[in-house]
Amino acid sequence: EIVLTQSPDTLSLSPGERATLSCRASQSVSRSYLGWYQQKPGQTPRLLIYGASSRATGIPDRFSGSGSGTDFTLTISRLEPGDFAVYFCHYYGTSLLTFGGGTKVEI
Amino acid sequence: EGQLVESGGGVVRPGGSLRLSCAGSGFTFEDHGMNWVRQAPGKGLEWVSGINRNGGSIGYADSVKGRFTISRDNAKNSLYLQMNSLRAEDTGFYHCARVTTGDYRDPFDFWGQGTLVTVSS
């Protein structure tokens, strides 16, 4: 089973700053099956990135994904007020899907 | 885009059973893989089970294998999760989630609001 470990647990930043979120896999995985979701309080998760670096429909270009092997990164280039949320990485390349524990981006 | 509405949650004693349902509307249900994902209050996401578009490919998390059964009825645009031998650690909101493709092992493009399952004596 692949385990995804996200860091940091919490990221305290201000609007306009750059956010860098990490997702580390317990073994090398195909980047084709790595995704990122955003979840705001009281809402369901929203798909941001799939295939490690492809933006989902309607996602602004300030969100970008990168990485390969065991290390993946979600970058938010300039935080806007609506970006303060919890972010989860997700691996869907095996019969056992898995999510990371999440990173909270707070003001 | 469509809608997913879960039902069937409730309070159940350890060892008990529940059957969750997820009704899809506004899209061609039979074209999409589906998954169940749970979230304990204030906690992260845990994948529970997935099923492809025709039910021929199914997966379960190790934590629920042998206790939970996923199924679907495309004629009724519905997804189900039969949960037996429930434990306290099964407590949480159970969301159904639609997959972008017919497989269950692809990104989830939208989610239902969830139904709350509480396992407590």
Image (spheres, coloured by chain):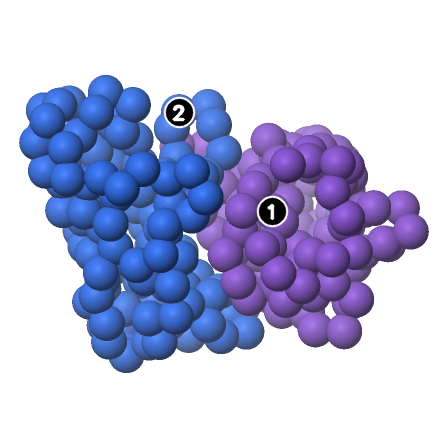
Chain colours: A blue, B purple
Task: Identify which residue is drawn at 38% across, 28% down.
Answer: A40
Q: Which residue is mark 1?
A: B97
Query: Chain ID for label 1?
Result: B
Q: Is residue A16 above or below residue B111?
A: above
Q: Which residue is mark 2?
A: A41
What's the residue type where badge 1 is placed?
Answer: Ala
Rate crowding at label 2 as few (under 14), some (14 to 19) or many (20 or more) other CA atoms within 10 Å: few
**Residue A12: mark in rendering:** none
Q: Position of residue B104 (x, y in %)?
A: 61, 63
Q: Is disc 1 placed on a helix, strand or loop?
A: strand
Residue farthest to the right?
A: B75
Task: Identify which residue is drawn at 33% across, 76% down.
Answer: A29
Relative to residue B76, is residue A104 drawn left or right?
A: left
Task: Identify which residue is drawn at 42% across, 48% down.
Answer: A56
Query: Chain ID for label 2?
Result: A
Rate crowding at label 1 as few (under 14), some (14 to 19) or many (20 or more) other CA atoms within 10 Å: many
What's the residue type where badge 2 is placed?
Answer: Pro
Image quarter of the N terminus of chain B: top right
Quadrant in the rendering for residue B8:
top right
Task: Identify which residue is drawn at 8% across, 31% down.
Answer: A17
For this rendering, which residue is in front, A95 or B32? B32
For this rendering, which residue is in front, B2 or B78? B2
Image quarter of the C terminus of chain B: top right
